[in-house]
Image (spheres, grey):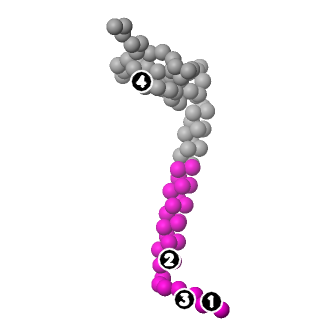
Amino acid sequence: MADKPQQGEILGIPYNFERPSIGRMLSSYWQPGKGMLVQKPFGIGYSLNLANWRSWVALGVVGGLLWQEQKSRSADEEAAEEDDSGPVEVIVD
């Protein structure tokens, strides 16, 4: 039986299942001169290239959205606590 390939491409998406080394892990996330997305050192797909400024912009946008979500979630919880003042009487004519 033939050995399965450890790395390659399926439908244009790269994969790599070779045992990762520390050097390969570190060098894969910092590749000056490459695009925003680079091949993952282990697994399927792409990862951010931290040597590219666009990656830092993307991380900033994601961080800002997460911060905004946490802020709105805590504001919703505070509003729900204030609304629990007691029963409300509704009169229908």
Q: CA distance from mark 2 to mark 1?
A: 25 Å
Disc on res. 42:
4
Q: Residues within 10 Å of mark 2 (few under 14, many from 20)?
A: few
Q: CA distance from mark 2 to mark 3?
A: 17 Å
Choose mark 4 or mark 3, whichever is in front: 3
Query: Closest to the observer: 9 or 19?
Result: 9
Choose mark 4 or mark 1, whichever is in front: 1
Q: Main secondary structure of the magenta part?
A: helix
Identify which residue is drawn at 47% across, 21% down.
Answer: 15
> Taking 53 as reference, is 1 above or below it?
above
Q: Which residues are magenta?
A: 65-93
Q: Residues within 10 Å of mark 1 (few under 14, many from 20)?
A: few
Which residue is identified by label 2?
82
Disc on res. 89:
3
Q: CA distance from mark 4 to mark 2?
A: 49 Å
Q: Amino acid at mark 1?
A: Val
Choose mark 2 or mark 3, whichever is in front: 3
